[in-house]
Amino acid sequence: MSKKAKNRREAAQKAVTRARGGQRGNRVIMGIGGVVIVALVAAIAVSVTSAMRGSSGGGGGALVTPAAATGDGGIRVGPEGAATTVAVYLDYMCPYCGKFERANSGDLTALVEDGTTALELHPLSFLDAQSQGNRYSTRAANAVVTVADKDSERVLAFNAALFANQPDEGSAGLDDAAIAELAAGAGVSQAVIDAFGDRIYVPWIEKTTEAAFDGGITGTPTVLINGVKTGVDLYTAGPLREAVIAAAGAAR
């Protein structure tokens, strides 16, 4: 790693530490739409991703775009003709993303299954620096994108399993074997699980993470309904579902 890249990485880590303020509750700044991470911190963290490719997590190969990808870097689950599209920007190390998932997973899955809604997951990797060099955010995101591309019917169950077993921010994160075990428990085939280690989609995840912040995303979770950021309570079951149904009615 070059001295310049090393300095950037250290600056990102120090900035995240300052944002955390020494307390778990202060790791992020709460906002109506979710957790607002200081945009500068995110930008610095993304800028050093390529310098970290040699650490646990691999990556660095040719950019491969998953077939399930949307034009703005999400992975789509659900019918093309759905009245509403819910886009969720998340990081698998983000504790508030876990809180969001536990509150809304059941409702969102039901809305997708009844054809009302299409869900777009945008798995980001800007919290890689918070897993002790193990790049948990990237490895988890790569696994989810792999499932979305090769076994799409299992992606929501796998996504829910990762959040149900979410490691603490600042820990080493789940290792590859634990991620594989959760995927198997969600019904993902062994052939797809075996592809996790190839890190096929790591360059794509790095690219889409950078594009998300360049496009105005400032933290996770960020939720858009038909392209508009929602201001409803994201951490209590019900409000998001009601907002999605209302948007579906307005779209008819």
Image: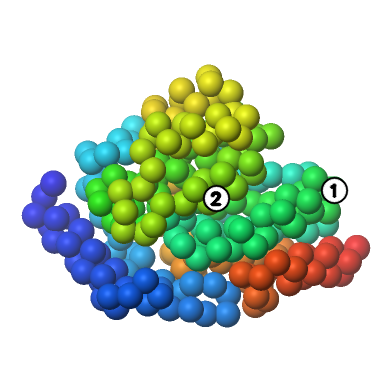
Which type of secondary structure does the marked residue at label 2 adopt?
A: helix
The answer to whether 26 appears left or right of 234 in the picture is left
Query: Along the horizontal axis of the image, is 70 left or right of 22?
Result: right
Mark 2 vs 1, N-terminal side? 1
Q: Which residue is most to the left?
A: 3
- Cα gap from disc 2 to disc 1, whole angstroms: 24 Å
Whether residue 49 is visible, yes or no, is no
| Residue 186: image location, x then y, percent | 61, 35
Q: Who's the residue at 52% across and 80% down the image?
A: 31
Q: Which amino acid type is marked by label 2?
A: Ala
Asked if 105 appears above or below 176 in the picture, the reply is below
Residue 183 visible in the shown view: yes
Residue at the spot of label 2: 164
**How far from the left and from the top, in percent, is residue 103?**
65, 62
Report the residue that reaches farthest toward the top.
191
Residue type at mark 1? Asp
Q: Circle 1 is placed at which residue position?
A: 114
